[in-house]
Amino acid sequence: NVFFDPMVLYVRYDSPFKTFKDLIEDAKKNPGKQRWGGATPGSVEHMLTYKMQKVANIKTVPVSFEGGGDLLIAVLGGHVDLGIGEPGEIMGQVEAKKVRVLVNFTAGRLNALPDVPSIKELGYDAVVEKFRGIVGPKGLPAEVLKFWAEKIQILLKDPKYKKYYESVNLVPAFMDHETYTAYIEKKNVELAEYLGSIGLLKKAK
């Protein structure tokens, strides 16, 4: 693995929800009222809504959008209470103080949003990453795997490349072949549970 693509939850700047705590407290007081905007069922954004319902013991209404631009327009227009998406989709509106980011769903804070807490530091087991890695044919020789592992780590430390990937809000998250394989296997289990819960994956008999 090379990068994690972080996900964030944001609201309109004048929203009554100034913190993630505000949002969760309101969701508990008014179950089934908040409209959580995100991508279509089966997506990472939709999965985050599902996970937050479980770990925070809340009930919300998922609202699906085809793209981040459509979702942002809906948040700005007050058609949904919040949006879940990637930082790059909204940073212009963050800087213009049109939207406010309440939390990111990684394990730590983001360089682009240093004042925004991570979901982990807030105490919720809801870290979800879009992971970006390199794959190849099964059975690649060990020396080939070693070559790529070494070169990727060198590349991630390159100042020019670091400046680029930080500018597009990618989080470096190198994993070697063995670690990445175990990580994907774990994520496959989590994904199967989620897809089964929303009826997109039938359980094997």
Image (cartoon, rainbow, N blue to C red):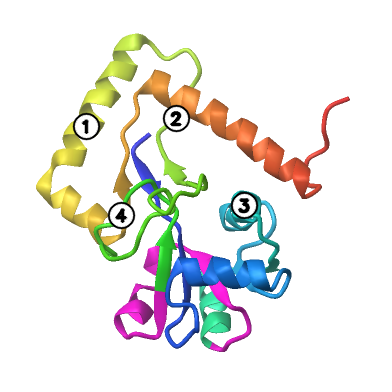
Specify which label sits upstream in the sequence, 3 or 2. 3
Mark 3 → mark 2, Cα distance in angstroms: 24 Å
| Secondary structure of residue under mark 2 | loop
Callouts 4 and 2 close, C-beta under 8 Å: no
| Residue at the spot 38% in from the left edge and 46% down from the top edge | 107
Q: Amino acid at mark 3?
A: Met
The part of the chain drawn in magenta is 77-100
Give the mark nearest the N terminus, 2 or 1.
2
Residue 76 colored in magenta in the image? no
Q: Is residue 36 visible?
A: no
Q: Position of residue 20 (x, y in %)?
A: 47, 67
Q: Which residue is mark 3?
A: 47
Q: Please name whichever residue, 146 or 192, is drawn nearer the observer in this view of the structure.
A: 192
User: Which residue: 56% across, 89% down?
Assistant: 77
Categorize mark 4 by other alpha carbons within 10 Å: few (<14), some (14-19), many (20+). some
Which is nearer the eye, 100 or 162?
100
Marks 1 and 4: which is nearer the front? 4
- Judging by the rendered image, the residue that carries numbered circle 2 is 135
Of 176 and 50, the residue lying toward us: 50
Farthest right residue? 205
